[in-house]
Amino acid sequence: MRNAVTEYLPVVSCVSSLFYAERWQTVAMSIEWYSYFGVSRQAYYILSAMIGIHELLKGYEKARLIDLHYWSVPNIPELDSRRQLSTRDIAGSLNDCYLKYREAADFILVHDVDDLIYLKHGSQFYPPLKQLWQENPFARTLNFSARTVEMESEKGFSKFSMLKSFNSMNVLPDSITGKSIYNTSLIESIWIHWPTEYDRKLKPVTWNENDAILIHARNFNFGQYNNSDNRDVSYIYIYTEKKE
């Protein structure tokens, strides 16, 4: 039995499940980014990761910035389920997250760990989201255009600067499919880009790039300090069972 979260958390983010997570820079930047912009709690579902990343996540969990959930793909031998379920069971983990936090949150963001949502003027998320749904009570989702960026970074902890990496962002020209933010009073089931079930009178609202953008922080150019200070990064920490 998994219980719903009852603590009031106005804005929650559900991060798609981590599989073979190896880039700690992305994890740290994402958690710090969403914390800065007012996300009350970030839910991380983990299938497998390097030990150093797991330790990093545990540190953020201790600081109450994230909740860490251990996830596994169901093993049904007669169906060969672990090969049949696409993309590391993102649908299962995201809907588990949505149902777990739906009663606690007014709004839920759904995104990958390398997606960074930015609102105009660096606004905290809650006030403009509340205003948007007051003005558009039948909005099923808030959608964003998205752009991939490349940025500079370092592999070593001692030389890594998050501010330097953010300042080095170079936005690439091609738009890609963005993600959505959901009003939990209207949507019952979700997917990575849009809801899977909704009342047909509800319509999506899309903000243009003058109001908000999703930054896809995928491409890194690493500098000269490439020796990591984390001695455990060569080991993979894999979970085969859920642990709650």
Image (cartoon, rainbow, N blue to C red):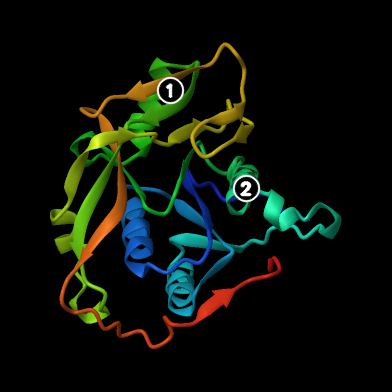
- Furthest toward the bottom, the residue is 231
Residue at the (30%, 82%) spot, across then down: 228
Q: Position of residue 20 (x, y in %)?
A: 51, 67
Separation (CA) of disc 1 from disc 2: 33 Å
Question: For the residues carrying marks 1 and 2, which lies nearer the camera in this image?
Answer: 2
Residue 11 image offset from top left, x and y in percent:
45, 43
Name the residue at 56% across, 68% down.
48
Q: Is residue 79 above or below residue 221?
A: above
Which residue is disc 1 drawn over?
133
- Above or below 218: residue 127: above
Q: Nearer the viewer, residue 130 or 202?
A: 202
Res 171 seen here: yes
Could you tell whether 198 is left or right of 158 in the image?
right
Tag 1 near tag 2, CB within 8 Å:
no
* Rendered location of residue 97, percent (x, y): 60, 48
Image position of 67 (left or right of 123): right
Q: Residues within 10 Å of mark 2 (few under 14, many from 20)?
A: few
Question: For the C terminus, which image quadrant?
Answer: bottom right
The local secondary structure at tag 2 comes to loop
The amino acid on which the numbered mark 2 sits, given as a three-letter code, is Ser
Which residue is located at x 37 percent, y 37 percent?
A: 126
Res 6 visible: no
Q: Relative to residue 32, is residue 60 drawn left or right?
A: right
